[in-house]
Amino acid sequence: MELTDQKENAENRAPRNIAVIGASGSIGLNALDVIASSRGRLRAGVLTVNRSVSKLVELARRFKPDVIVVADSAVDRSPLTDVPIGTDVLFGSDSIDEVVRRPDIDIVLLSIVGVAGLRVAWNAIDAGQTLALANKEALVAGGSLLMDLLEDRGGKLYPVDSEHSAIFQCLLSRRRAGTTPCIVGRDVERLILTASGGPFRTWSLAQLKNVTVKDALKHPTWNMGSKITIDSASMMNKALEIVEARWLFGLDSERIQVAIHPQSLIHSMVEFVDGAVLAQLSPPDMRLPIQFALDETARLPGSARKFDWKQAFSLDLYPPDFERFPALELGFEVAKNGGSSGVVLNAANEVAVEAFLNNRLIRTTLKELPPYPAFLN
């Protein structure tokens, strides 16, 4: 389809109604910027937050959604007196389950962090919705179940993570009529996930023993929430993406690789059996993969940054250091073993990240732990 045809189709139909689950987070706010810049082809029909009530009211007054949801029912509700007329207010996680099933919703953008996203993803897919997925943990913990449900219900899933969106975009060039874009064909040799390397890419093992929370939150490229930023610093984020890629694209873990790319301009690559490699490049800006998902792969003008081709830039690629970043090995192991291993990895990581952010993470080894009964107590 030519770009002019895509523009005409976008102008001649009603706006896509988007449910933004996690509207106050980094992905949610970027998605709302995409919606605001869409020239009327996208609309925010549902907005949800966990506890950020004041921010939710601010967004509701700007975007005039049909429904807003606050997942935590115990929050201070006084700011909600300023919700615009015509916008319904709901509370609790059960209400999120309900709004993602609304028949007037065209696309559910799932951008909340953590395994809580699994429940939302399940309900959206079960309802046959189109799901724009920016939550890694749902596929890490329940990838096989979600992909089976997706096939059974006949919905669509568009990856929003920049790496998986990049692979998805590369694979679209090889899509055959009547096939699902998320299924890798026989002509694919391997998927290469790129990673910036985070703030500790050049740190020695000795330096890594003294990392502080402040150090870990200084990501060199992306502006993200604290949990994802810590995951990126430890490369656990990439480990989760390995598992995510395994389920999204149906490729064995042995055919998934990681390359360190400090500039964050190559967002991932696909190598084909003949040796050709396709890569998706763009400035690091989450608005591009978000828009690609919300516009259901149509190439249309948007608010994402573009290259300045008058400026010189470099593209460096390095193999990962598994000794410096052992989390990568865990990602490959989970992608290979499947079963409940993803649940264990994700749960352990969420507990460890929370403890680290609150300065409660104990730096120790198994040999230093007290005897078994005392340790439990």
Image (tube, rainbow, N blue to C red):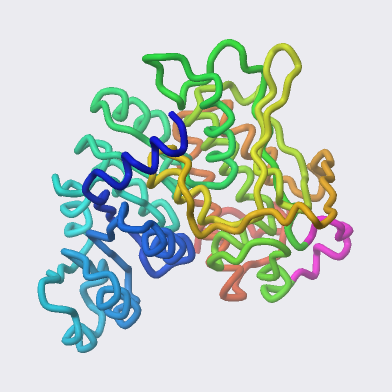
Taking the spot 69% from the left edge, 13% from the top edge, the residue there is: 273
Q: Nearer the viewer, residue 373 or 172?
A: 172
Q: Nearer the viewer, residue 50 or 2?
A: 2
User: Start and end of the magenta stretch?
Assistant: 200-211
Judge whether 99 appears above or below 340 on screen. below
Judge whether 312 appears above or below 130 on screen. below
- How many marks the image carries: the answer is 0
Judge whether 161 appears above or below 339 on screen. below
Residue 249 image position (x, y, % from top left): 51, 27
Q: Is 317 a magenta residue? A: no
Residue 195 image position (x, y, % from top left): 70, 47
Q: Quadrant of the N terminus?
A: top left
The picture quadrant where one finds residue 297 is top left
Taking the spot 62% from the left edge, 75% from the top edge, the residue there is: 359
Q: Is 203 a magenta residue? A: yes
Q: In this image, 118 relative to 327: left or right?
A: left
The picture quadrant where one finds residue 312 is bottom right
Residue 120 image position (x, y, % from top left): 29, 49
Q: In this image, 99 relative to 298: left or right?
A: left
Taking the spot 62% from the left edge, 17% from the top edge, the residue there is: 188
Q: In this image, 274 relative to 14: left or right?
A: right
Judge whether 350 appears above or below 149 on screen. below
Residue 12 image position (x, y, % from top left): 25, 44
Taking the spot 54% from the left edge, 34% from the top edge, the residue there is: 169
